[in-house]
Image (cartoon, rainbow, N blue to C red):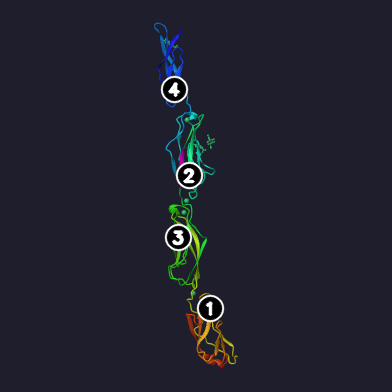
Amino acid sequence: MRVLCVSCVCCVCITRVLCHTGALDVVSPLDYEVSKEFTLRIRAQDGGRPPLSNISGLVTVQVLDVNDNAPIFVSTPFQATVLENVPVGYSVIHVQAIDADSGDNGRLVYTLLETGAGFPFAINNSTGWIVVASELDREAVDFYSFGVEAQDQGSPPMASSASVSILVSDVNDNAPQFLRDSYQGSVYEDVPAFTSVLQVSATDRDSGLNGRVFYTFQGGDDGDGDFIIESTSGIVRTLRRLDRENVPLYSLRAFAVDKGVPAKRTPVEIQVTVLDVNDNPPVFERDEFDIFVEENSPIGLVVARITATDPDEGTNAQIMYQIVEGNIPEVFQLDIFSGELTALADLDYESKMEAVGGPSTPFAFPPPATALECLGGPVTQCWGGSGPCS
Ligand SMILES: *[C@@H]1O[C@H](CO)[C@@H](O)[C@H](O)[C@H]1NC(C)=O
Ligand SMILES: *[C@@H]1O[C@H](CO)[C@@H](O)[C@H](O)[C@H]1NC(C)=O
Ligand SMILES: *[C@@H]1O[C@H](CO)[C@@H](O)[C@H](O)[C@H]1NC(C)=O
Ligand SMILES: [Ca+2]
Ligand SMILES: [Ca+2]
Ligand SMILES: [Ca+2]
Ligand SMILES: [Ca+2]
């Protein structure tokens, strides 16, 4: 029996069945992603009269996948923000591509593009999760932009790429840093309150409030309240009158504090030297010196050493002695520097002495000066006696 014609009974219009030969041709494009399988019912008809046919023949056509779809990234571009202190391994962002193919033709492997050695992000090549691979530091790099590629495992493979940007956000991980290890300044003891002495300055590498610095003595040492520090400028000022004779040197301790939460603070040592002003007159040890000279003392003998002290410093404390009253005729000689009082003749005089503190000429130098009486009376009494007066 010869089959005259084989034709398609129940099928979509993708095939053509040729009569006589029964060859099955594809007449329109197949798409595995649309239909993976076709089931065709075939009619066979003979050339008899009447012709007999049989339509029970079933043909199943399996469409095989070929790699004809490239991966497609969804929701590009990818953007993420990550805190700079997240641990290594932290998942930052999921980049995902889809591939309509099946099997290896749709199995995607992700890689990062344009990333050199030491790049702080890595991608899980199967999931597409981008993770932190090494410690981040916003103060070094605060923004990353790179590419990511998804490649299927078809043959030949198809790939597509997308861009990823990651913003590294700040954490208060830097303490303020002073520009110098310590600060030194000096100020005269007589300056008015609120005189500026010096300025300290610190920087903070963080951003925003984490990097905004203010200054304070709180928790440090403000010289028992003798100094203040301006919180924004860092200028150290006197808060009241100083006294070098009381405190010649201040060792202060200030802090630079940022406004992060929690705040970071850095201490710094500040030395303030108080410079002397000639604000103290010399002071005699006593108001009165009673000097007794023995009977047969030779003329020219040092009968006393007058001493005064001056709490000031340097030339402000250099004392010169002079007799200001009562030495007429000249019976005493007072050494201007040593204060040695020498008798030049018989003693029967009231004398007045002055000690002048301060540099340059003792006479022209302005006060303070203290006059002191040296009483000659008792000396006269004792002149002829032996031993102290009674
Ligand atoms: C069609 O062919 C099948 C398989 O050879 C057979 O079993 C069946 O009886 C035939 N049908 C007719 C109507 O001849
Ligand atoms: C990628 O992610 C999968 C699923 O979470 C995990 O099993 C695998 O270990 C990861 N690969 C790497 C290299 O981390
Ligand atoms: C994916 O990553 C794993 C672990 O790093 C590696 O062993 C594997 O070879 C990678 N696969 C491809 C296709 O690169
Ligand atoms: Ca594919
Ligand atoms: Ca900081
Ligand atoms: Ca920081
Ligand atoms: Ca002084």
Element under disc 1: loop
Amino acid bearing label 1: Gln
Callout 2: 10 Å neighbours few (<14), some, many (20+)?
some
The stretch of residues the image draws in magenta is: 162-168
Q: State which tag comes first along the sequence, 1 or 4.
A: 4
Residue sitting at 53 percent across and 76 percent down?
Answer: 315
Q: CA distance from mark 1 to mark 2?
A: 71 Å
Residue placed farthest to the top in the image? 49
Disc ID at residue 37: 4
| Residues at marks 2 and 3 touching, judged by CB atoms closer than 8 Å | no
Mark 1 neighbour density, 10 Å: few (under 14) some (14–19) many (20 or more): some
Q: Main secondary structure of the magenta part?
A: strand
CA separation in Å, label 1 and label 4? 117 Å
- Alpha-carbon span between mark 1 and mark 3: 41 Å
Task: Report which residue position mark 2 lands on.
Answer: 144
| Horizontal side, residue 151 vs residue 50: left or right | right
Q: Earlier in the sequence, mark 3 or mark 4?
A: 4
Question: In what element is the residue under mark 2?
Answer: strand
- Measuring from the top left, give residue 335's x and y in whole percent: 56, 84
Which residue position holds label 1? Answer: 318
Q: Nearer the viewer, mark 1 or mark 3?
A: 1
Q: Position of residue 242 (x, y in %)?
A: 46, 71
Residue 175 at what x, y percent from top left? 48, 55
Mark 4 vs mark 2, CA separation in Å: 47 Å
Residue at far front of view:
27
- Residue marked by disc 3: 215
